[in-house]
């Protein structure tokens, strides 16, 4: 395993501008004490997720992880990587569906103003930030502050994700679907139950997740040839680090006759279940085990009182069929040198 260095500098006390130089370790430790009020709205901005990405995909990257401290609390976090005077968010669109700055409620404008000052002093003249949700801190607070200062800002749509609010009960969810899709969901569930002994279970404790990884990887690779090619040694190392570093990880399995035949890799963060990836035994496609595993993960999320289900990026038809609504994903570029 590559040892995580987190930042090119060691963690340091807050500077005169209130920013502290952090590592993944110091950020994680600080969040347990002075940063509990921060809201991480997706797994991709969690320190553990960023650490896994950096260790596998960019071990030599020059990281600039900065937290703004106010009265002993973390008001905001800027997890950046810098190259040739351009700052980007830690992660990339290939494996991180949306990224962002992290900020305490009510502190967005003040944090973004201070961050722009900090970056200018550090000699950073360009920001290239993506992928971003429309309700991200970047779009909602950093962009208005940059425009107020006369900086050139470019925002382009580059992708779409699908998400939905979860109702209180499973029957309420089914009623939200179109008549055709509601009928299909019920029909497929009845057919599966009629043909075999089945069950859905969620693995969420770290030791159990580590033990379940091999089953997930096997199902992922035997699903399709392109997915097998995607899950090469480096990608497998990445998934194994996610399981190690991200305690919000959940793996849901659909078992038929006591054998796992489909799986979903999810993360439960701030009341939302994020469907990150999935796989299934293609020899049982006639029982729709792949789609039903996703349906059952939705039912499980409702039973646990989650408020939202995020299918993440991609326009696969099942996301429409299961109730997902499109949300655009943006790229934002800011030139700090002026208009």
Image (tube, helix red, strand yellow):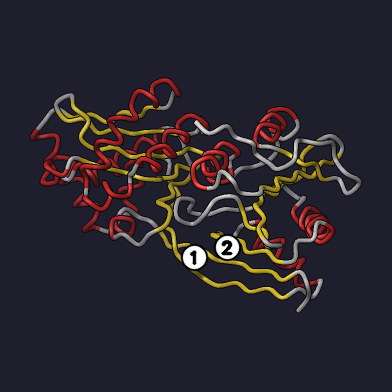
**Position of 331 relative to 313 (above/below):** below
Answer left or right for 251 relative to 140: left
Of residues 68 and 24, the one nearer the viewer is 24
Q: Earlier in the sequence, mark 2 or mark 1?
A: 2
Q: Residue at x 85, y 40 (%)?
A: 14
Query: What is the C-alpha distance between the residues marked 2 and 1?
Result: 7 Å
Camera-nearest residue between 295 and 286: 286
Question: Residue furthest toward the right?
Answer: 16
225 w.r.t. 21: above or below? below
Residue 90 shows up from this direction: yes
| Residue located beneath label 1 in the image | 328
The residue lying furthest to the bottom in this view is 339
Q: Nearer the viewer, residue 299 or 52?
A: 52
Which residue is denoted by mark 2 in the rendering? Answer: 134
Which residue is at the front of the view, 189 or 257? 257
Q: Mark 1 and mark 2 in contact (Cβ < 8 Å)?
A: yes
Element marked by disc 2? loop
Question: Compared with residue 219, is residue 95 higher up or lower down, i.e. above or below?
Answer: below
**In the structure shown, which secondary structural element does the residue marked by tag 1 occupy?**
strand
The percent coordinates of residue 243 (x first, y second) are 45, 32
Residue drawn at x 61%, y 61% is 129
Is residue 271 shown to the viewer in this render? no
């Amino acid at each position: 395993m590559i040892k995580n260095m987190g930042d090119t500098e060691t963690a340091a006390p807050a500077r005169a501008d209130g920013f502290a130089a952090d590592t993944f370790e110091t950020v994680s430790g600080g969040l347990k004490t002075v940063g509990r009020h921060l809201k991480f709205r997706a797994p991709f901005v969690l320190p553990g997720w960023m650490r896994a990405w950096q260790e596998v995909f960019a071990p030599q990257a020059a990281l600039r992880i900065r937290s703004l401290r106010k009265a002993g609390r973390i008001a905001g976090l800027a997890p950046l990587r810098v190259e040739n005077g351009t700052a980007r968010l830690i992660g990339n669109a290939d494996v991180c569906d949306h990224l962002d700055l992290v900020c305490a409620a009510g502190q967005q404008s003040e944090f973004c103003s201070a961050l722009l000052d900090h970056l200018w002093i550090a000699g950073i003249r360009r920001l290239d930030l993506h992928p971003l949700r429309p309700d991200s801190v970047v779009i909602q607070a950093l962009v208005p502050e940059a425009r107020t200062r006369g900086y050139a800002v470019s925002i382009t749509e580059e992708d779409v994700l699908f998400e939905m609010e979860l109702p209180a009960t499973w029957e309420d969810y089914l009623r939200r679907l179109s008549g055709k899709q509601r009928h299909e969901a019920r029909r497929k569930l009845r057919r599966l139950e009629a043909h075999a002994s089945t069950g859905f279970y969620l693995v969420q404790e770290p030791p159990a997740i580590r033990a379940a990884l091999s089953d997930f990887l096997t199902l992922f690779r035997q699903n399709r040839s392109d997915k097998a090619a995607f899950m090469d040694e480096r990608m497998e190392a990445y998934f194994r680090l996610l399981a190690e570093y991200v305690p919000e990880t959940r793996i849901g399995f659909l078992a038929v006759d006591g054998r796992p035949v489909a799986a979903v890799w999810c993360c439960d963060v701030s009341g939302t279940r994020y469907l990150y990836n999935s796989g299934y035994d293609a020899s049982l496609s006639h029982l729709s085990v792949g789609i039903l595993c996703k349906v059952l993960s939705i039912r499980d999320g409702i039973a646990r009182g989650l408020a939202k289900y995020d299918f993440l990026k991609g326009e696969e038809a099942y996301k429409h069929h299961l109730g997902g609504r499109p949300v655009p994903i943006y790229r934002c570029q800011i030139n700090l040198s002026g208009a």
